[in-house]
Amino acid sequence: MMWDLAPEFNAAIIFAEHRFYGKSQPFGNESYATIRNLGYLSSEQALGDFALLIYHLKNKRLLVAQNSSVIAFGGSYGGMLAAWMRIKYPHLVEGSFIIIFFLIYSTIS
């Protein structure tokens, strides 16, 4: 759905990788080695990362997007993150599109 809507709104689609997943290992091979390191593996930390990414992209990299709306999207856990982004950072995220199992829910202000 996002692939169909993005061109219609001249929108950019940007994916962020959650820390501790894929290549995003904040402590390299030691990422899972200690409880202290694992303390940075949380939804709240991920939301902060995404908020910083949005701010950086809009203010440093994609200056033409400074006044553009941001819609967070995701499915399952990513859907929960999208909803929490809208709740925690309403000044950055204007809406969220969430797909969880077979339920589709959208919030756009």
Image (cartoon, grey):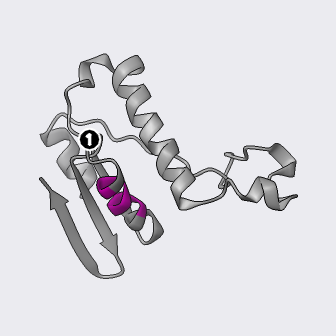
Residue 67 as seen in the image, left or right of residue 24: left
Residue 16 as seen in the image, left or right of residue 11: right
The main secondary structure of the magenta stretch is helix
Residue at 14%, 39% in the rendered image: 9
Up-down: is 56 above or below 63?
below
Residue 13 point in image, percent of width and height: 33, 41
* Residue pointed to by mark 1: 91
The verdict on residue 82 being magenta is yes
The verdict on residue 65 being magenta is no
Residues rendered magenta in the picture: 81-87
Residue at 22%, 43% in the rendered image: 6
Up-down: is 64 above or below 69?
above
Residue 37 point in image, percent of width and height: 78, 53
Residue 83 point in image, percent of width and height: 33, 62
Please tell me which residue lies in front, 43 or 99.
43
Q: Quadrant of residue 75?
A: bottom left
Amino acid at circle 1: His
Residue 76 point in image, percent of width and height: 43, 72
Residue at 18%, 34% in the rendered image: 10
